[in-house]
Amino acid sequence: MIPAPFAYTRPSTIEEALQAIADGGEDVKVLAGGQSLIPVMRLRLAAPETLVDLTRVAELRGVREDGDMLVIGAMTTHADVLTDPLLAQYGQLIVQATETVADRQVRRRGTFGGALAHADPAGDLPAVALALDAEFVLAGPGGRRTVPATDFFVDYLTTALDEGELLVEIRVPKLGEGWGVRYEKFNRVAQAWSIVAVAAAVRREDGRIAEARIGLTNMGPTPLRASATEAALVGVDVSMETVTAAAAQAAEGTSPSNDLNAQADYRQHLAQVLTRRAVAAAVGL
Amino acid sequence: MTAVEDPTSAVDLPPAKEVGQARRRKEDARLITGKTTWTDNMVLPGMLHLAVLRSPVAHGRITHLDVSAAKERPNVVAVYTGADFAEEQGSLPCAWPVTPEMVNPGHPSIAVEQVNHVGEAVAIVVARSRTAAADALEAIDVDYEPLPVVLDMEQAVQEGSPLVHDHTSSNTSYHFVFDAGEAGTGGDTEQAFADAEVTVSRRFVQQRLIPAFMEPRSVVVQPSGDSYTMWSATQIPHILRVMAAMVTGIPEHKLRVIAPDVGGGFGGKLQVNPEEILCLLIARRLGKPVKWTETRGESLMTAHHGRDQVQFIDVAADRDGTVRGLRVRLLADMGAYLRLITPGVPALGAFMFPGIYKFPAYRFECDGVFTNKVPTDAYRGAGRPEATFAIERIMDELAVELGMDPLELRRKNWINTEEFPFTTVAGLEYDSGDYHQATEQALELLGYDELRAEQKRRRDSNDPVQLGIGFSTFTEMCGLAPSRVLGSLAFGAGGWEQASIRMLPTGKVEVVTGSTPHGQGHETAWSQIVADELGVPFEDVEVLHGDTAISSRGLDTYGSRSLVVGGTAVVKAAEKVVEKARVIAAHLLEANADDLEFTGGKFTVRGTPGAGVGIQEVALAIFAAHDYPEGIEPSIDAEATFDPENFSFPHGTHICAMEIDTETGFAKIRKYACVDDVGTIVNPLIVEGQVHGGLAQGIAQAMYEEAIYDAEGNLTTGSFVDYLVPAASDLPHFDTGNTVHVATSNPLGAKGVGEAGCIASTPAVVNAALDAVRHLGVTDIRMPLTPERVWRAIHGGGDGGDRAAQGSNAYGGARTTESGIQEAQQ
């Protein structure tokens, strides 16, 4: 529980942060709250030579509007997310999922961008970002680029971030009139990671489902979309029968792991049940 | 009356009794504001820090061990291996040889040639800082030649199994038998089964648990000449002192052990730890103070575990439900070594399997089995939760077999209140109680009839969420323990407790107790008792404990013994103080001692209004000692040692209402009601707190906790991510109540409450879960009731099966039958 020695820098601007990352060489890690990094360092599962702590980079923190989009700074803490008025209005799916993240103390330190860049498939926020088709704005020595969520999550704990790059903000569409959302999380105790969870955002139009976005947590090495279910929902009447039928396809294309909490077949079963419940709740059934 | 003329006259009302008041704990302010010194907060001049290199293999020979590079690391003072202490470390003590033939392979504090479980100490770095010590561990070079790993008890006892200790002839440490027929406390068990109209047999698994106390273990040793002071986060400073003296050869009077405020133990700190001995040996060798504090990972991996039994239980009964016989065979996992009371835990449980029922015949057998895992030992309840689980589960199974209501079956067989004192088939004399009354109250608290009606509605409508109700009508043996009984069970110590009371010149009172608390609230409860006994204000009493130089005699805290035995010693000491003060008061009042009355802290002369002297005034008078009777010592201080003649037997009825989501297997406690009879209640707030905490731990065994080793013997539940300890948010509201039937074995009438909730709750929860889904064909679900296990039991049959791969201890596939092991059908 005592980390190996490391060097520590605490920049105050994005520019300084990028420089510190460049100076840190190969064994540099970005500390974006420490929700996951600090435990693995204390267990000596990770022993970076240099930590670049982003806590003081004020420009990375906060939520703003940009037309139809919300722009969330990477260092916006979970606690910030839960009290932000814009997210309360347009980002309920993010808020619901964030409420289930860890415990109150951790939510004061852990950050939205940190959780996404860590890309733990059992984490709650990657599936939400994927369901929302979030855009990831990455800053690097050569400038900025924007990566769609489908490309951002590459593999287990692996993202499209290149060496020397920093996730600076995440852009998500505002979900307004007609949209209903639900984050349906399944775990054994309140503060545990999801065994499986489902993030659903569904738009109703004239008694029918016009659009459905469903992200799956912990159903593979990356967050996944329940694409077959999404397709099956479009255009159907809002009823338990149609939702149940569509949710039965939620596990298609998934490859969940076997571990102490669940074996793969049980996870696939859960994905169907939770998808049905999430969609039903999102459409107000 | 003319009392108004003299407000100090004897007709003043005495102050309200302290015993029975829900006082807030006087300990809490300093504990919850961090204003105390935990062992790890100790800083001594020149203190060095230890870090322990631990074996990553479960079973192997150390073929190469090179510490030279570690010695060169910055701020490292010394690095030791087992070879450095091979001649002086001796063996950690096992105080409970349950049979004369018991095999104890010996337990080195640090491995010398062979490691027998993951986490065993292999080398120790001594450095000027904790971080320097931890860093240098990485520079130690060690190789192991792997040996076959023995994990599964049922395989370990088979002929030809690899051995944990190659100098033993089998993995069985002992075979312990209690047979009521042979003991003369019951009939012939085999005959009872041969004659029975109905028999039910089950195999229950008590999974391995981790005590998971809040404060990690920590030890500081300060040498001073040829004397040593040890601070340790322990439950047992007195026992530790004796044992450490015997192991290290440090004379007992040269060793002082202090347990400062200790943050929980649950039995997990009822131990003589390898690191406590190693700290002493290293402090002796270096002549410097040393400290070792474990990390949470070390704690989960190397502090002793609890439970871990496979239970084969058979019950015989008549068709009408009258029980005729009980037969229990246990395999109890010792782990790799025998620690302080490792073998005694299942043996202690032997006497509780009959529970509250009038079995005419009973036989118990237990094999203690070695495996390559960390040793098991005391964990809240120690033997009694295992017994209570088995009997309360099999009573439900018998009810199902007979088509009877589970409560009706219990009523038919339990001891009725007019039958106390009742000698059970296990030879225990139960003191008092009323199982009927506790059950009726608990049913009312739960709202039983409405929940049964809802259960029926849900069943009839095939609701995906099913409801079940489970009972546990339990008793336990507490107040450990009558010393003669412990002697008859070959336990290595007595069960008495000591207290002394010192009356200070200003009238303040110091109470010294040998019962060392680690979170229970002794300081508050003892103050309440003394306030009543001496008639002094609660605030005037200070309770001293946990330091062998202050409380020289004591047997510490475990087995719900503190109030029952230690509290009684306090009462006895107070009675002596009053009697000594009475002689002096009589002298001061120029009266005959026999004519004095003592109430509300004041001696008065019978028939002489107005004449009186307070006991606090007597304390000052005798301190001055200017005027006291001839022939007595000028002191009213007193001490007392109390050795109980019997155990006490708390009982209660716990009822759990459980919702099971049949689609996901998720189990959720809908309502939990319990009525406990713990005898006299000194402080209702403390009692309720103990019940709540006990319920949390008992429910945790049923639903959340399980220590799992993989097939190589690695603890896969090595952090709180995987070893699930529930938090308040995971637990329901508890509806608690009490009945009071005083214990007859002590003047307080207290029975003990520290373990009640933990012992009672586990089977109530599992019975409730089964009641919810039995109509779907489920007959058993292994603990903990993970959603996956519940789901598989509902949809696939069996007991919910595996959580881990074959070969690990959480693999549910291996089954012992009379003919040996067979693989269960997958």
Image: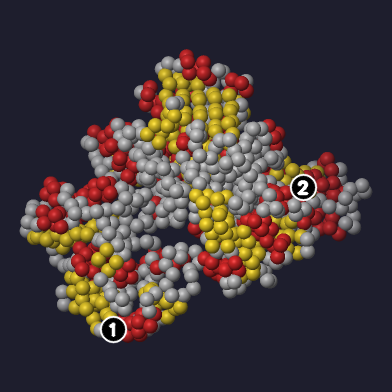
Secondary structure state at the residue bearing disc 2: strand
Q: In front here: B451 or B515?
A: B515
Where is residue B356 shown, x and y percent of the image? Answer: 52, 29
| Residue depicted at 44% across the width and 29% down the height | B820
Question: Residue type at mark 1?
Answer: Pro
Where is residue B116 shown, x and y percent of the image? Answer: 54, 48
Q: Please give the label number shown on residue B639.
A: 2
Question: Residue type at mark 2?
Answer: Glu
Q: Disc 1 vs disc 2: which is toward the camera?
A: 1
Q: CA distance from mark 1 to mark 2?
A: 78 Å
In the displayed structure image, the side of residue A225 where residue B496 appears, left or right: right
The chain holding disc 2 is B
Q: In front here: A217 or A209?
A: A217
* Marker count (numbered): 2
Where is residue B450 shown, x and y percent of the image? Answer: 33, 36
In the displayed structure image, the side of residue B426 where residue B790 appears, left or right: left
Q: Quadrant of residue A129?
A: bottom left
Q: In front here: A68 or B575?
A: A68
Q: Are marks 1 and 2 in contact (CB under 8 Å)?
A: no
Q: Which residue is mark 1?
A: A141
Where is residue B59 shown, x and y percent of the image? Answer: 52, 48
| Residue depicted at 62% across the width and 64% down the height | B79
